[in-house]
């Protein structure tokens, strides 16, 4: 009797949980309407405008890259990352993980990529603003700085341009803090973003799902902390080669970083 009673209690608990979730999130079981929900767009633009208004900010994050093996099995690789921004023309990012360990420096005139593991670096002249430099790095050097989608001054405009639909999933809790969860769809990528509630609408989590890649792998960024009033100086964005560092060309550096270790 005790076994039957215990089993029955578990069944009742599961049914109650499913009922609660169904009541709280009725939209998840139905097809979402086409187009972008005005409320989702409003919240995204509010986040983008707030971040663009910060003259300086720093962030600490953890990114997870998912790859799909030929067998269909998914493997994930984590990379802690730090970010420093001083608008309009200074940026520094450091990503260290299983696949890549690189530092990204932009001082308003030059862009430098440094690989501490190999003690190699490459430097090139760069455009005069952060936005232009991010485009230059992506298009000319095939380099994407960590979480670059969120660093553009017109981040929402760029993200919405590639989206065909979007809606507010609802309230959520990430890292113990209340957020609002948004979800968007595009022709090649679906993406989700969690935005902090209150007077500092900062992005706290970001997921990209690659629909055109077999297995639809995901790239996740979890932003652990923000500082929107740091006191950064030019020194933080200036690259000084460490002892024994070798200067090489960008193409060679990126190829070296891609080699398995």
Image (cartoon, rainbow, N blue to C red):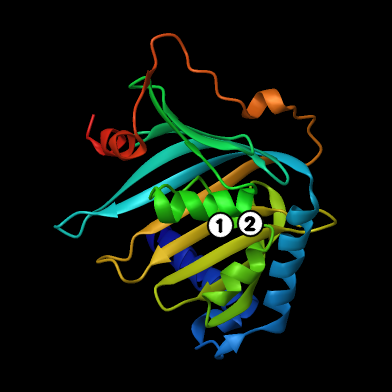
The disc label shown at residue 152, or none: 2
Q: Residues within 10 Å of mark 2 (few under 14, many from 20)?
A: some
- Check if mark 2's residue and mark 1's residue have beta carbons within 8 Å: yes
* Residue drawn at 71 percent across, 27 percent down: 234
What x and y, as percent, mark residue 132?
58, 54
What x and y, as percent, mark residue 199?
85, 56
Front residue (pair 135, 214) = 135
What x and y, as percent, mark residue 94?
52, 33
Going by the image, does 49 lie left or right of 4?
right
78 w.r.t. 171: above or below: above
Residue 191 in sight from this viewpoint = yes
Going by the image, does 207 lie left or right of 236?
left
Residue 82 in sight from this viewpoint = no
* Residue drawn at 41 percent across, 22 percent down: 116
Q: Work out which residue is located at the far right of the displayed protein and give it.
A: 199
Label 2 SS: loop
The disc label shown at residue 149, or none: 1
205 w.r.t. 146: above or below: below
């Amino acid at each position: 009797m005790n076994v039957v009673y215990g089993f029955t209690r578990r069944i009742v608990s599961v049914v109650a949980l499913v009922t609660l979730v169904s009541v709280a999130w009725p939209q998840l079981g139905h097809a979402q309407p086409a187009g972008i929900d005005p409320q989702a767009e409003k919240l995204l633009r509010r986040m983008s405008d707030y971040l663009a208004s910060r003259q300086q900010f720093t962030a600490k994050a953890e990114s997870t890259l998912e790859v799909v093996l030929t067998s269909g099995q998914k493997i994930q690789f984590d990379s802690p990352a730090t970010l420093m921004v001083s608008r309009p023309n200074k940026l520094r990012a450091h990503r260290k993980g299983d696949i890549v360990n690189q530092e990204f420096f932009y001082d308003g005139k030059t862009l430098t990529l440094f690989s501490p593991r190999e003690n190699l670096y490459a430097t090139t002249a760069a455009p005069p603003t952060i936005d232009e430099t991010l485009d230059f790095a992506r298009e000319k050097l095939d380099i994407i700085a960590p979480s670059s989608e969120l660093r553009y001054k017109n981040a929402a405009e760029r993200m919405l341009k590639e989206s065909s639909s979007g809606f507010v999933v609802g309230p959520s809790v990430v890292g113990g803090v209340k957020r609002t969860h948004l979800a968007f769809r595009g022709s090649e990528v679906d993406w989700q973003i969690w935005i902090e509630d209150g007077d500092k609408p900062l992005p706290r989590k970001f997921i990209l799902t690659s629909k055109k890649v077999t297995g639809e792998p995901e790239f996740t960024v979890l932003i652990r902390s923000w500082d929107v009033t740091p006191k950064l100086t030019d020194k933080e964005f200036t690259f000084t080669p460490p002892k024994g560092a070798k200067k090489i060309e960008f193409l060679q550096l990126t190829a070296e970083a891609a080699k398995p270790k």
